[in-house]
Image (cartoon, helix red, strand yellow):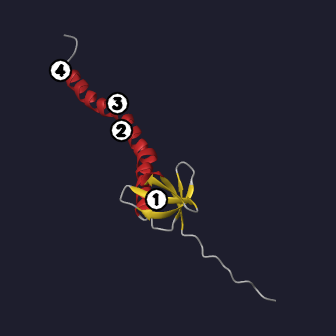
Amino acid sequence: MFITDAYAQAAGTAGSENVIMQFLPFILIIGVFYFLMIRPQQKRVKEHKAMINALRRGDNVITSGGIVAKVSKIIDDNEIELEIATGVKIKVIRSTISTVMGKPAPANDTVEKK
């Protein structure tokens, strides 16, 4: 009795705008998480995968366990053989390689004569 029809209709339209405003902070939080956390992690994973696929025989690498070694043989898409010392070879999973330091520089055996 005390509420007019016009007032009841106006309250209904304000409620739909209010729902959008309630969800806006959640949408913004999801956007911030995507750009600050998810997207950079996906980029790192893509770069690591490209680095692992570019491994070649003779590359110096560091495993995630901290072993510094040289790639002596690529067994298949999942395993490689590393030489950690002269005559000491181990098999590791490719994904455990954390850093590729590149090929070793050739030794400079020339001695300058004065």
Looking at the rendered structure, the secondary structure element under dot 3 is helix
**Left or right of 7 in this view: 34:** right
Q: Which of disc 3 and disc 4 is earlier in sequence?
A: 4
Q: Which of disc 4 and disc 2 is earlier in sequence?
A: 4
Q: Do the numbered discs 1 and 4 sit on residues whose CB atoms are within 8 Å?
A: no
| Residue that sits furthest to the bottom in the current view | 114
In the image, 35 versus 81, the foreground residue is 81
Instruction: Specify the quadrant of the image occupied by residue 30.
Output: top left
Which numbered mark, 3 or 1, is in the foreground of this view?
A: 1
Q: Amino acid at mark 3?
A: Gln
Give the class, few, some or many, for how many residues have Cα within 10 Å of label 1's Cα (few <14, many ≥20): many
Q: Do the numbered discs 4 and 3 sit on residues whose CB atoms are within 8 Å?
A: no
Looking at the rendered structure, the secondary structure element under dot 2 is helix
Residue 1: x, y in percent? Answer: 18, 10
C-alpha distance separating marks 1 and 4: 81 Å
C-alpha distance separating marks 3 and 1: 56 Å
Which residue is under mark 1?
81
Q: Which mark is residue 27?
A: 2
C-alpha distance separating marks 2 and 1: 47 Å
**Left or right of 16 in this view: 41:** right
In the image, 76 versus 33, the foreground residue is 76
Which residue is under mark 3?
22
Q: Which of disc 1 and disc 2 is earlier in sequence?
A: 2
C-alpha distance separating marks 2 and 4: 34 Å
Q: Amino acid at mark 1?
A: Glu
Which numbered mark, 4 or 3, is in the foreground of this view?
A: 3
Residue 108: x, y in percent? Answer: 66, 79
Which residue is under mark 4?
5
Residue 34: x, y in percent? Answer: 40, 45
